[in-house]
């Protein structure tokens, strides 16, 4: 069954100057580079945007900049996660006012031990739903909150604005398949994440989209488009081609991969990450480039 939300919707990294301040022109170039790769949507302020290292004022700056610069060319998802429900709702209202298309949120958590219950998670998502923007709920290990299949099914069926699920927990494919069997009519966008490291299995389970990093969306998109077109051999070939780079990014680099690739391609001037995030080692960077160069991705030549 065709779903309204599909394709590749990568996360935009936050660009900083070497002194750690926001590089506003660099952030515009990041967005432009992503659009030039024919992405189907863009997510900002996510974990791969270093949201946990941004002040509230910087979040506001990046939200406004992104919405204004993208100017409706592709849909934009703004991450609004916070432990405090009132803050999440306030962020959702701001996103609606500024013109965001979708908001993304994780279950309420703070640190390793402070987590919302299933009831509190339902209540927070329901409160955001009252704002009137489509919601993508992110099921990610980072929160430490277990979003069970019964809970996700209940939310999908009972919270009208919960339209998309981004599943990136252990056993993503099996979880997606179970959710679609239980509540498929209520899920308009079944997505995976984790840089697409299990993308082919997740597509086979019923995913219609993926939220990757901004490193090589032009190379990963053919996996999705070929599979959704019924061209499974082409999808498998495309996936096999990019998997070593995806695996290295996922296991060795994290969100630093996109920044390093963008520096290499002169999209941005600095791969700076704020303390306490360490810089990527020279060895990991060299191996990343060794995986990327044979793919000839847009990012490595965009600014040259």
Image (cartoon, grey):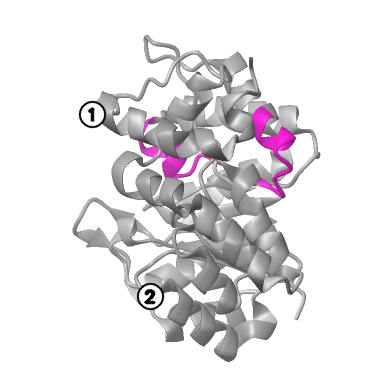
The residue that appears at 40% across and 38% down in the rendered structure is 255
- The x and y percentages for residue 235 are 63, 64
How far is mark 1 from mark 2, CA to CA? 30 Å
Mark found first going from the N terminus, 1 or 2: 2
State yes or no: residue 43 in magenta.
yes
Q: Is residue 55 visible?
A: yes
Q: Element under label 1? A: loop
Q: Nearer the viewer, residue 37 or 292?
A: 292
Choose top left, top right, bottom left or bottom right for residue 208.
Answer: bottom right
- The x and y percentages for residue 34 are 65, 35
From the viewer's perspective, tell me whether residue 297 is left or right of residue 199.
right
Name the residue carrying label 2: 171
* Contact? badges 1 and 2 (CB < 8 Å): no
Name the residue carrying label 1: 276
Span colored in magenta: 33-53
Choose top left, top right, bottom left or bottom right for residue 185.
Answer: bottom right
Which residue reaches farthest left? 113
- The x and y percentages for residue 215 are 52, 38
Quarter that holds the N terminus = bottom right
């Amino acid at each position: 069954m065709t779903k309204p939300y599909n394709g590749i919707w990568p996360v935009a990294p936050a660009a900083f100057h070497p002194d750690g301040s926001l590089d506003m022109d660099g952030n515009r170039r990041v967005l432009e580079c992503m659009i030039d790769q024919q992405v189907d949507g863009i997510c900002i302020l996510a974990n791969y945007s270093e949201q946990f290292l941004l002040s509230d004022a910087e979040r506001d700056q990046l939200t406004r900049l992104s919405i204004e610069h993208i100017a409706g060319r592709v849909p934009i998802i703004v991450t609004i996660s916070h432990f405090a429900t009132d803050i999440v709702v306030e962020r959702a209202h701001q996103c609606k006012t500024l013109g965001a298309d979708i908001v993304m949120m994780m279950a309420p958590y703070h640190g390793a031990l402070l987590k919302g219950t299933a009831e509190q998670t339902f209540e927070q998502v329901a409160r955001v739903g009252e704002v009137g923007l489509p919601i993508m709920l992110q099921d990610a290990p980072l929160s430490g909150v277990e979003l069970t299949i019964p809970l996700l099914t209940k939310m999908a069926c009972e919270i009208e604005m919960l339209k998309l699920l981004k599943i990136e927990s252990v056993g993503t494919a099996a979880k997606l398949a179970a959710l679609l069997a239980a509540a498929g009519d209520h899920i308009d966008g079944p997505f995976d994440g984790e840089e697409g490291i299990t993308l082919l299995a997740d597509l086979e389970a019923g995913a219609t989209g993926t939220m990757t990093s901004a490193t090589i969306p032009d190379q990963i998109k053919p996996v999705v488009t070929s599979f959704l077109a019924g061209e499974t051999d082409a999808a498998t070939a495309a996936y096999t081609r990019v998997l070593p780079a995806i695996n290295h990014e996922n296991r060795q680099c994290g969100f630093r991969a996109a920044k390093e690739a963008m520096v290499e391609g002169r999209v941005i001037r600095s791969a700076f990450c704020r303390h306490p995030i360490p810089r990527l080692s020279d060895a990991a960077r060299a191996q990343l480039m060794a995986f990327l160069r044979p793919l000839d991705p847009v990012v490595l030549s965009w600014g040259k």
